[in-house]
Each structure stands twice: as C-alpha cells, then as structure tokens.
Image (tube, rainbow, N blue to C red):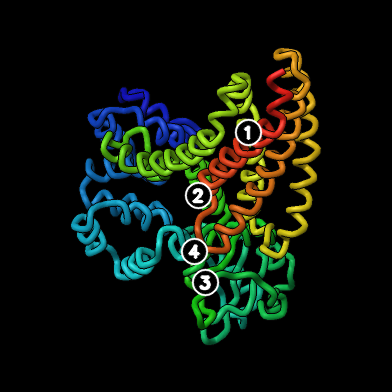
Amino acid sequence: MGENEDIKKIVNEENNDIKLVDLATELLGYEDEEIEKICKDLDDKSLAIVLEQAETKIQLKIISFIDNSRILKLFGLMSKDDIADVLGSINTGRRKQIINIMKEGDKAIIKQLLGYKDDSAGGIMTTEYIALNKRLTISQAIDKIKEITPKTEYIQTIYVTNENRKIIGTVDLRDILISNANQKLEDIVNENFIYVTPEVDQEEVAQIVSKYDLSAIPVLNSRKRMLGIITIDDIVDVLVEEQTEDILKMGGVAKEETLDSTLLDSIKMRLPWLLINLVTAFLAALTVKMFEGTIAKVVALSATMSIVTGMGGNAGTQTVSIIIRNLAMGKVKFKDVKHLILKEVLLGVINGAAIGVVTGLVVMAIYKNMYLGLIIFLAMVGNLIISGFFGLIIPIILEKLNIDPALSSSIFLTTATDVLGFFLFLSLASIFLPKLMI
C-alpha cells in the first residue's frame, strides 16, 4: 500500500471512499516515511477522507507532513466538527496559525466548537445543517435547500426558525417534497421536537437519541437559537467510545492508555489500581488468618474455600456488568433498588443452590465427608446472595454519589465477595469442625 501505484489504484477505484477509510486504519502500522509519501501521493479529496477517519496519532503526523495552505484545502472538504477535532489535537502554536488564515465565518464557527468540552454536546456537534424561515413557501424552501445542500452534512431534517432566528420546530425533507408549492413551512412544521444544550454530556445525548430513535438532534442555546446538530454517525462514535471506556475502567485501565503508551505512562495509569486491589487482598488474607486454627486442623478447607469466593466473584461480576450497562442507558433509578434487591437475592439462592449441590457432591466424593459438602453448599448459597446484593447496590450507590461505577465497582465487589465469602465459609467450618475431623 505504500507504493505509488497502489495509492493511485485506490484513488481511481469506484468505491475508493471505503478503501480510504481502511487505509486510515492501516496507517497505524506504517512508518513515518511511508505516511509522508502517502500524503504527497493522495489528492486533496482522498487525503481529507483519510485525515477525517484516522486515529488522533495519525492525524497529528499527517498535519506535520503538510503545510498550512494544504491543510486549509483539506478542511474545505471536511465537516466543521471534524475540523475542530483535528485542531483540538494539535499544538497551540500551529492551531493559531491555521485559524488565523481561515475565512472569518469559518474561523468563528471553529472557535465556537473549540470552546466546548470534547465530551459535551457542543464538542461533538456540527454546524452544517439547514435552517429556514417559517415564512418561506415550499417552493422557496426547495430552492434554498438546493442552494445550501452541497455545503451541508445533513439534509434529512430541516430546522424552522422565526424572525428572531429562534427554532420553532422541524420539517422532514420528505414532507416538504410532497407538500403544495404555495404552502408555507409554518403550515407543516412539527413544533414538538427534542433538543439538547451544548453543555450536556455526550453519553446523555446518546441516550436521548437512542430513546427517541432520532437521526439527528439540534443543539440550542438558552435563547432557543440553533448552535448546531449532532448526527447519528457522531452518536455511534460516542457509543463505541463510552462502551470502550467502561470496559477499560472495569479492568482498572485508563482510556488514555494505548499500546503505544510509554512504560512510565502505563505504570502511572495501572499501578494505583493495583495498589488499591492489594489492600482488598490484605483484607481477605486477614479474614483467613482469623481462622488459622480451623484451617490447620482440616487441610481440605484451604483447597476448597477458593471455590466459594471464586464463584461469588463471577456471579457478582455478572450483576455489576448488567447494572452498569443499564445505568449507562438510564434504565435504572435509585427508586428501583428494593425490587431489584429481592430479585438478586432470589437469584443468589437459586443459582447458589444449583452450583452448591454440584460442588458439594464433588467435594464430598473427593474428601469422603458429608459435612464438608454441606458447608460448601451453604457457603455457596450465602456468597452468591452476597455477590448479587453488592453487585447491585455498589454501582447504584456510586452513581448516586457521582462516582463512575465502571471505575470503582469491581474493587468494592472483590472486597465484599472475598472477605465475606471467606468469613462465611470458615465460620461454617468452625461450627462443624468436630464433624470435619472424624
């Protein structure tokens, strides 16, 4: 792909946009010299697509290999929100140089986009939409749409404004095309529409779009004036980003860490969580130490107690994963806790009994002791109830305290299932100790 002929082949192919998106992904494995050569070989339209779709690291390299005049040409082929994303990643000096040579209208839009947080509605919106005055006739509106469409990212929904440029509603392009030419937009406008303000978190925006099955959502300021729109392709990116972030956090890994992170950066991002987990491990060890005498008399306990805590941790992780997912989708509220606790307790009893019977029978067959099998059964039921309860309550409480449940739930859950699991199992063993020594 690094060869000149291969690049020309991509550009000349009928479906080259798809190939260029693939190329943008593949560039992560390219050397700097190859990327620089590709920048020279690709025409402006093709390189704009690659720049738009590439990872931040590759975007920075592409920007470093081309001059400011060509950057402006590429930006002329890109949407404003993507331009803002690229500019937001480069160093301040180069960013100022590029913005200073932009047209005044583009400059104002980009500066506005750069003023919002990356993960807010304002940070992911685009300013390329169609807004028309309510007094326009359908015929006039169609003429305006034809004029504006070549420069606009999204045309399926037309936003209708009054004389003060305040949005009063929306009209589907389809409704405009089938309406009488002499009708006015205000006659067919839908005044019931969903919108967000620029400060709203991108995850909340994604929830709203998903809930109401929207293909785009307008971003309005406090005066109900249009700032931009967020389209479905940006929402898909948000969902992927947020889900990836949650998965990494559940593993105690920061979203900023990549395979290319330096050794020092990886240590800084991972070590704190490992140290916190070490504290929970010491708590579990202290719990076991309380029952050293019992374990010393019945060695089989040391070989079997990890089964109970291990299964408790697995069951708790199932509950935590489901609750965190539903919290992220806005489907779980604090008021739902009582009903959900009852369900998790019953689930713990049923699953614990099923697993406990199997484990108890196997342990009884190995160690030829019915009471050890009974202890395993009771401890398994008890620890699965514990894991279900804490797997539910921990993320909900953390969410209520405005602490990211994906980041902290697993630590508290591990502590609960290990400490309480060991305590329950060894307490039962102490009660049945005379029977275990027969």
Q: Amino acid at mark 3?
A: Thr
Residue marked by disc 2: 408
User: In the rendered image, which quarter is residue 94 located in?
Assistant: bottom left
Quarter of the image containing the C terminus?
A: top right
Residue depicted at x 80% and y 30%: 354
Residue 197 drawn at (x, y percent): 52, 72
**Disc 4 from disc 2: Cα separation:** 26 Å
Near-viewer residue (105 or 150): 105
Q: Is residue 265 depicted above or below 209 in this figure?
A: above
Q: Earlier in the sequence, mark 4 or mark 2?
A: 4
Residue marked by disc 1: 426
Near-viewer residue (228 or 385): 385
Q: Earlier in the sequence, mark 3 or mark 2?
A: 3
Q: Earlier in the sequence, mark 1 or mark 2?
A: 2
Residue depicted at x 43% and y 56%: 79
Decide if residue 374 is in sight here.
yes
Residue marked by disc 4: 121
Q: Which mark is residue 197?
A: 3
Secondary structure under the numbered disc 2 in the rendered image: helix
Disc nearest the viewer among 1 and 2? 1
Secondary structure under the numbered disc 3 in the rendered image: loop
Q: Amino acid at mark 2?
A: Ser
Q: Earlier in the sequence, mark 3 or mark 4?
A: 4
Q: Answer whether labels 1 and 2 touch (C-beta < 8 Å).
A: no
**Disc 3 from disc 1: Cα separation:** 55 Å
Disc nearest the viewer among 4 and 2? 2
Q: Amino acid at mark 1?
A: Leu
Q: Is residue 20 depicted above or below 210 in this figure?
A: above
Q: Answer whether labels 3 and 4 touch (C-beta < 8 Å).
A: yes
Q: Amino acid at mark 4?
A: Ala
